[in-house]
Image: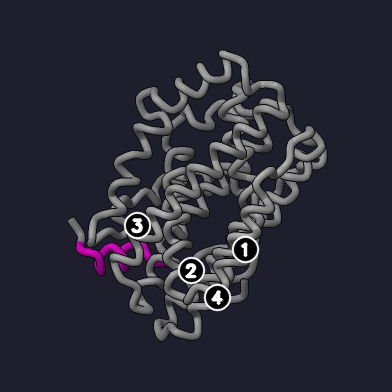
Amino acid sequence: MMNTNEEKNHTRQPLQVRQLLIDLSQGFSRHWLGGDAFRTHLFNAQSFSFPLGEQYFIDSVKAALPLLKDEQLKEEIRGFIGQEASHRHIHAKYNQHLNTQGLSYFIEPFVKWRIRSAARLGVKSNLAVTIAYEHFTAIFADGALSEPCWIGDAEEPLKTLWTWHSIEETEHKSVAFDAYHAIGGGYLRRIAWFLYVSMLFSFDTFVQTSHCLYRDGQLFKPRTWWQALKYCLRPRGLLWFSLPHYLAYFKPGFQPWERDNLHLTRQWLTEQVASYREIGKPAEA
């Protein structure tokens, strides 16, 4: 078992910013994820959250930059910012098509209010919130890349979009975490904000997914909730896959690269090179 410093050195590398070369102008079907309304709208709910949420993450790590001395970490942060900005852009287009399907970001006013309120927090607390959300997205990305029952039956171009997003979330899953510790962030603050974010993430996901299902006319259908039970409770499904990774965050010595799953990204990036364009260098993002 590598210690924390060895894990960081093992995985730290330049982050490549990529433009995804897919066409969303023709839209996609209402139940694009294997005809499964629940899984489709669970992923749609996450997409609705990304433009606002990832801008908050960008702002949080930018605020830490002047406090950092590690030039390599600063370069990683610039790569992180570039990747998250690309995610914001493509998910804004994705969400526009969701709007044409009659779906909307129901909790947007509440999320905007929370982000405005976060302006009163210090750099460490905003980073602690960011790394909590980044842990959730890293778990989600890990499941999407490693478990066929998550997005294996998705239609294109959304299968490509979610795979690309999951790869980049995996690549940068430790950047904000490393920045937090580099500016002196401690365990108690990290866990306190993680518990807070756990409640918010669960609430937001449930409410927004339910709203999408309601607007789609699927909320009160028994088949929808059978789909939910299958996805959440099956072996390697959402709950049983996510739980050990969620609990690992509570370890005092936790580091995101304890689970070194970078190998999940390499085959797709090699085989699907025509699906994206590399943009400059991370330091130029």
Q: In the drawing, what numbered circle is on residue 62?
A: 4
Q: In the drawing, what numbered circle is on residue 55?
A: 1
Residue 106 is one of the magenta-drawn residues = no
Q: Is residue 266 above or below residue 58?
A: above
Which corner quadrant holds the N terminus? bottom left
Residue at image position (46%, 29%) is 148
User: Visible in this render: residue 278?
Assistant: no
Q: In the drawing, what numbered circle is on residue 126?
A: 2
Q: Amino acid at mark 1?
A: Gln
Instruction: Write the start and end of the magenta stretch as one range.
Output: 3-14
Instruction: Point out the tag, 3 or 2, that comes first from the N-terminus.
Output: 2
Residue at image position (44%, 49%) is 136
Q: Residues within 10 Å of mark 3 (few under 14, many from 20)?
A: many
Q: Amino acid at mark 3?
A: Pro
Instruction: Point out the tag, 1 or 3, that comes first from the N-terminus.
Output: 1
- Which of pointers 2 and 4 indicates the residue nearer the eye? 2
- Quadrant of the rendered image containing residue 174: bottom left
Q: Main secondary structure of the magenta part?
A: helix
Which element is circle 1 on?
helix
State the image coordinates of residue 224 (x, y, percent, origin top left): 57, 19
Q: Amino acid at mark 2?
A: Asn
Q: Residues within 10 Å of mark 1 (few under 14, many from 20)?
A: some
Residue at image position (52%, 54%) is 168
Residue 9 is one of the magenta-drawn residues = yes
Which element is circle 3 on?
helix
- Which of pointers 4 and 3 indicates the residue nearer the eye? 4
Q: Is residue 129 above or below residue 107?
A: below
Real-space CA distance between mark 1 and mark 4, rounded to the nearest whole angstrom = 10 Å
Q: Amino acid at mark 4?
A: Lys
Instruction: Point out the tag, 2 or 1, that comes first from the N-terminus.
Output: 1
